[in-house]
Amino acid sequence: MTKVLVVDDSNSIRDMVSFTLKSAGYQTVEAKDGQEGLSKAQGDSFDLVISDVNMPNMDGIALCTELRKLANFKFTPILMLTTESSTDMKMRGKAAGATGWLVKPFNPEKLLATIKRVVR
Amino acid sequence: MNIQAMANEIPAEGEHSIEGIDFITSGDQYLTFTLSHERYAVDILCVEEIRSWERPTIIPNSPTYIQGVINMRGVIVPIIDLRLKFSIGEASYTETTVVIVLTYQDDDASRTMGFVVDAVSDVLNVEAEEIKPAPQFGGCVPPQYIEGLINAEANVVTLLNVANLQLLEKDDNHA
Amino acid sequence: MTVDLSQFIPSFLEESFEGLELMESGLLNLQEGDSELIHSIFRAAHSIKGGAGTFGFENVTDFTHLVETLLDEMRDGRREITSEDTEILLESVDCIRLLIEAARDGEEYDNEKIEQTSKRLTATLDGKDNSKEACVNTEEVIKSPNDVEYLIHFVPELSLAKTGNDPIFLFTALAELGVLTIEADSSSLPALNDIDPLELYLSWQLKLISSASIDDIKEIFEWVEDECELDIIIIDKDNSAPSSTVQDAEQSSNEQVKEVKETQEVEVSSLTDTPNPSEVTKESTAAIKPKAKSDVGSIRVGVDKVDSLINLVGELVITQSMLSELGSDFDMSKVDRLTNGLEQLLQNTKELQESVMRIRMLPISFAFNRFPRLVHDLANKTGKDMELVIKGEQTELDKTVMEQIGDPLVHLIRNAVDHGIESSEVRLANGKPKQGVISLDAYHQGGNIVIEISDDGGGIDRENVFSKAVEKGLVDANATLTDSQVYDLLFEPGFSTAAEVTDISGRGVGMDVVKRNIQALGGRIQVDSTPGEGSTFKVNLPLTLAILDGQLVKVGTETYIIPLISIVESLQIEKEFLNRVSGDMDLYRLRDDNVPILPIYQLFNINTQCTDLDNALLVVVESDGQKVGLMVDDLLAQQQVVIKSLKDNYQQVLGISGATILGDGSVAMILDIPGMIQMALEKAQRIQLKKYPNHTDKVGEYI
């Protein structure tokens, strides 16, 4: 089963994303900031990481950078959830090694359709 | 001590004891009881349980017919003596004195109260048409409590309105 | 498959309110250079905006966007943190709160206020409002009524895989749009030895027959557009054979580059799937109908409390099975074990009860947290320099009690600001520091929680209060009252000493309502003051509403319960201290007070042998600042009782606040002291009228 790591400091967004994924048959693990996300990643392997950008303790960009340093996350798709679609944001994401981004607000259908581009 | 069994053994005045209730196909059922020599009835669906008399805790400065409150499985239930309220016969408290606990439910809430009576009798199955209106005059029971009259063989049974019965204490001021 | 988002809305609302509180307290404490704080304020606004957008609360998103922009500039250092901006932000927090509440309750909101604050925000942003994400509805989607055949040439860069993008999945996504044929071109593949497994050497030619638009296709590649060559050509069924397009593609690659660049704008348009969000809004507003006054529905419970509960229930189960075993084969030799078992049961039940009650307990900080903002605003309004000091905010109390104590506390604080703390000039003139201090404290005492509101202001002017009370006919001009009795006059309805009625504290309708609310919770309030130095209001509340500490007393054959909280002391009457006045009123001299004696048996018409005052037992209770002595036959145990309402199946009874079930299963009435005093008053009045039908003086002025 495809396993997804969902990282977001907002409970309601995190719940929503996790629920949406689960109802589509994905398995999910949640973290409330980059720090927690990183430690959950280190003990485990995932098929996809979905992370918010603005979070306390460690933001999404930093998380992405750190994940790419881990051997089993070199090629794992990492998607950033962001409210900004500026080129600047995309550049920062790319520089950190992000696979792609999802602009907020998004609806569940869009989420599911979009992640099809990077996972089964 | 099985209260229900006891209640069933209580001699119903002038009636043979009943064996059981036959399968009813239509009409409504009413529990009959006696106050002195008169017969009364209430909708059986309102009957929560039948208890033997126990001395309740007095409510200070309440009318005499309000005997007090009892604890019924954690709920505080007021006990009203119909014989005193309607001034029928003598209010005696013996081992055979019975309390009928009635619960009435309307849209907002439900209320449970116990009523002291002399004896419980059988259950009548009555069609709606059989309930005749009561005469407006005379009688010790004020008309708002009477739903109608039922003819049970040679006797007349007064059907009481449970909702109004529960409003009893509102029309009195405290002494 | 549609996913129902409405189930997450309550969680979002709760989160947002918390976020707003964070923003508010953060803004109040914000100093220049406080980087971490401004970041957390920004994040809170950002979360609210993001969530609001996701759940379809457009107006919240739009407004919060402005706030977020301002905060962003502040946190980046592009803008200084000024107090004007902080004020605007504080106002904005109020606005967001209003908007979210309106969204939650499905109601209208005060648009004017939102407009005003919006304008101020925009003004201060100096019209640098370009970041308002215009959901550009412009981009037409190229409609293909029939299926169109697309030829897609995809040449990824060598390092594409490093970003986690895998062409296979891109193609899977493409395949969902229609019929896809893939042709791989491995011409660039180097010799086996030279292959770097991390690099992508393949390129593909894809044919897609789909009714999707060219934008839909481009969208699938949006993440990799910078790392590949992408050419999408529509094959007209009539002309140009597919094979020739390979060269065509290279030639027209410049044009294609432009096309690729366009995907940026296309992204925006493809996001305007507005039908869904507005549906969600409608659902959400319908779903959140129940009007939540102040979050009444749920409680957050720490896992530790739940675990403790689970442990205690476990122990209870063990005790139960032990007793059950004992009972099944019992004889007198096992009596000791039975006693022990019952002891244990008592222990378990006590601990379980305490543990369960603790679940309803929350720290009083939830009630206190709105006060810093309140004092801040009031300080601005009155022009007085004031500070609020809070202590004991971790003290816990029952959730319902806390919800109901909020308004009375607000009034007391407002009162302290308005009438307690003097203006700066007056303070300086009196050698006091310019800044007034209002302090708020909460602590546990006995089985209660005590909340103290003190100020270091001018104190209560006794003469002023007294003369005002006389003026209003609340008290006789010749009555001699102790200081505390005078201060208690403040709680009489219709009382107000303010020269003009200020809109902050209200028209003298406040204090009596405060007192009534506190009493309704089973508590009491007293006030102490030192002229020139300040005043302290002390509120005493039971820790929980459902349980009461009571003193059991016997009158005749009846058992009654007197709330411990109102008992001053219990004593045996000594004849020498008895006095009779007005013919039939008995008074007991207790130190300096003359305490009127109320015989319960008389008030309740109970038959009892103990009617003689001499050596009778007196329980002195206090209510409304007044002491009375309740005469009882006997004092029984003190115990905690569960309060059961008489109103459910019966009605309110004067003098009785509720009932409880004693250990033996019988019902006992709980006395309501203010009610009993009233009963005594009414009875005395009736006697008076009988004796002196012509007099209409008020009876029962206690000294």
Image: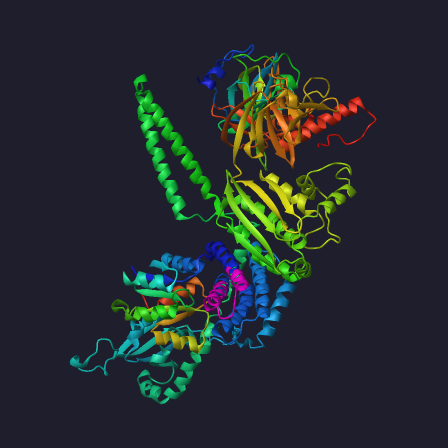
The residue that appears at 52% across and 29% down in the rendered structure is B75
Range shown magenta = C22-48
The residue that appears at 35% across and 88% down in the rendered structure is C248
Q: Is residue A38 left or right of residue C359?
A: left
* Quarter containing the C terminus of chain C: top right
What colour scheme does the image use? rainbow
Q: Nearer the viewer, residue C403 or C418?
A: C418
Instruction: Report the predominant secondary structure element of the magenta stretch.
Output: helix
* Quarter containing the N terminus of chain C: bottom left
Q: Is residue B105 left or right of residue C345?
A: right
Magenta residue check for C29: yes
Indicate the position of residue A85 as horizontal and vertical percent values: 45, 74
The residue that appears at 44% across and 17% down in the rendered structure is B1
* Image quarter of residue C158: bottom left
Residue at the farthest left position: C193
From what the image shows, is residue C366 above or below residue C254? Answer: above
